[in-house]
Amino acid sequence: MPRARRLVRQGDAIYRAGDALHNLYLLRSGSVKIRATNPAGLEQITAFPVAGAVLGLDAIETGTHTSDAIALEDSLVCILPFCDLMRNCRQDFIAAQQFNRLISHDINESRDLLMALGCMTTEERVAHFLIRISERMTANGYSPREFILKMTRQDIASHLGMKVETVCRVLARLQDAALVRVHRRQLQIRNIDALRKISSG
């Protein structure tokens, strides 16, 4: 299936809440934040997809997107027309399996976030967040120990259900304990085993 590509500039939306479902989007490069807003107008960052992720699965149930997908940096997406994708799934068992795995992965990501918000201390949440980023870096062929945080501290706080001041304090404590080194958005994991231990409670 031919795939049209679209360059999304930093800060621009790939789709917004309320948009009708026409396409899913394969993130080829860059990074994105998924922002949901409840009826009271409160916002939460629910995910930070990176290269390889498929965006837009939130719209499958109702046919309408329930969140905004905002580029954290200039990002490239492949456009996957939803009708074509469903036709392929009906005709190709392997394609259907792959699509089901994508949905399962999305569900598991949501479950992990709920568990972090409901069961972890603030320090455990931040450690878990950094470990998850490290694992994604490894999967995409980058250094698991040194990377740039594309999101703001406010975005991280929103994602983890914390105040931004608390995120900054936890990062400072981890740095004081020689587990990480932080300079603006540059982060180095100095003791990944200790960070994993905190992450697992």
Image (cartoon, rainbow, N blue to C red):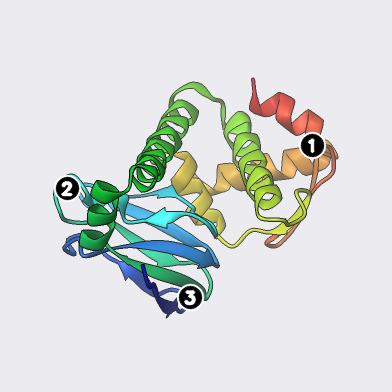
In space, the residues marked 3 and 2 are separated at their CA atoms by 27 Å
Q: Quadrant of the C terminus?
A: top right
Residue on which the image places disc 2: 39
Could you tell me which secondary element the residue under label 3 belongs to? Answer: loop
Task: Tell me what residue is drawn at x 70 percent, y 62 percent.
Answer: 184
Q: Which residue is mark 1?
A: 192
Residue type at tag 1: Ile
Q: Nearer the viewer, mark 3 or mark 2?
A: 3
Report the front residue among 105 and 35. Answer: 105
Residue lying at 72% horizontally and 30% vertically, measured from the top left = 196
Is 4 left, or right, of 112 in this rendering? left
Q: Can residue 42 be seen in this snapshot?
A: no
Give the camera-side residue of 150 and 184: 150
Task: Report x, y in % for residue 33.
Answer: 44, 58
Q: Label 1: how many residues lie within 10 Å, few (<14), some (14-19) or many (20+)?
A: some
Measured in 3D between alpha carbons, the distance from the residue under mark 1 to the one under mark 3, in whole angstroms, is 30 Å
Q: Secondary structure at mark 1?
A: helix
Which corner quadrant of the image does residue 85 belong to? Answer: bottom left
Front one among 9 and 88: 88
